[in-house]
Image: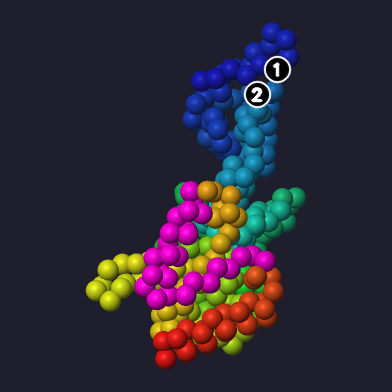
Amino acid sequence: MRYRRYGPGRRTQPVPERLAGAGFTYGAARAAGVTKDRLCGPGYVRLHRGVYAERELDVDGDRRVRAWLLALPADAALYGATAAAWFGLPVAPPADVQVIVPPGTVPRRRPGLEPHEGLGLDDVTVHRGLRVTTPERTWLDLSLTLGDVELVVVGDAMVRRGLTTCDRLVESADVARRRRGIVRARSLARLVRDRVDSPQETRLRLVLVAGNLPEPAVNPDLSDERGGWIGRPDLAYADVRLAIQYEGDVHRTNAERWRADVGRDEVLRDHGWEVVRVTAADIAHPAQLCARIRRALDRQRRRLG
């Protein structure tokens, strides 16, 4: 147990360890020996109806999300961008916690809470101890708010983290019915790939595809003529031995990483590959970038022709 002081020489009743560090329900407080009068005292704060926390606790981020679910029906689940953030995906957490419940049981909207209804029996899983919409359902829900590129970014990240597969995303979109924008979602699901290491790799790949270039392989393991491993570029056109490497700020500011990148590229060049290095500034000018990649493809085709 830990004591909390409020004012000179004033000491509250001890906070039971089982209640420290997170929000808790009124029932949990009573089970831990905390009376109703103590809950109304200076040591605790009421977060939501029937949900409390020790007053000095910073209830933000994960704690805020967990506290909201304690105040909601047991069949509620995290939804939309809140669900995506809970999975650790590259989506900014929304200002209000987004939740979803089965049809006909939607809770009232309150400050800090954005409720939805329509949760199916097969649309929920448990992740990090909380009920959350499945990755496939989460991705479809995000299709209502995210642009094309960012939706594929999230899909790539889901697959990379092992939350789902490319085939499951396509299947979930194909079987979905009566959803706004489902035709678009089905098309974008077919652009999700595995082995993608970062959102910028996704954006780079989509720029090339949108520029009518062939789709490059994603992070392929390359071998020499004897089968020895020589590298794993971000993107590659193996038929013409053209590798494309995305260079983020870490490649520029970390000297050790920069030296490793130089050595990596030299190994590929020694085996007849051309290496094109791309930055965020290049992605911001897609027409020029695609023209540059197209020239590199033409050079390699002539050289190997």
74 lies left or right of 226? right
Up/down of 137 relative to 62, above or below: below
Q: Give how far across and how far down residue 203 sits, in percent.
A: 59, 71
C-alpha separation, residue under disc 1 versus residue under disc 2: 8 Å
Look at mark 2 in the image and give the residue it sits on. Answer: 43
Magenta residue check for 251: no
Q: Residues within 10 Å of mark 2 (few under 14, many from 20)?
A: many
Q: Give how far across and how far down residue 91 sits, in percent.
A: 61, 60
Up/down of 135 relative to 14, above or below: below
Q: Residue 246 or 136: which is nearer the viewer?
A: 246
100 lies left or right of 234? right
Q: Can residue 155 be seen in this view?
A: no
Q: Mark 1 or mark 2, which has the lower sequence index?
A: 1
Look at mark 1 in the image and give the residue it sits on. Answer: 6
Badge number at residue 149: none
> Given the image, on which type of amino acid does mark 1 rest?
Tyr
Callout 2 secondary element: loop
Q: Residues within 10 Å of mark 1 (few under 14, many from 20)?
A: few
Q: Is residue 247 visible?
A: yes
> Given the image, on which type of amino acid does mark 2 rest?
Gly
Q: Are marks 1 and 2 in contact (CB under 8 Å)?
A: yes
Which residues fall within the magenta stretch?
Answer: 256-281
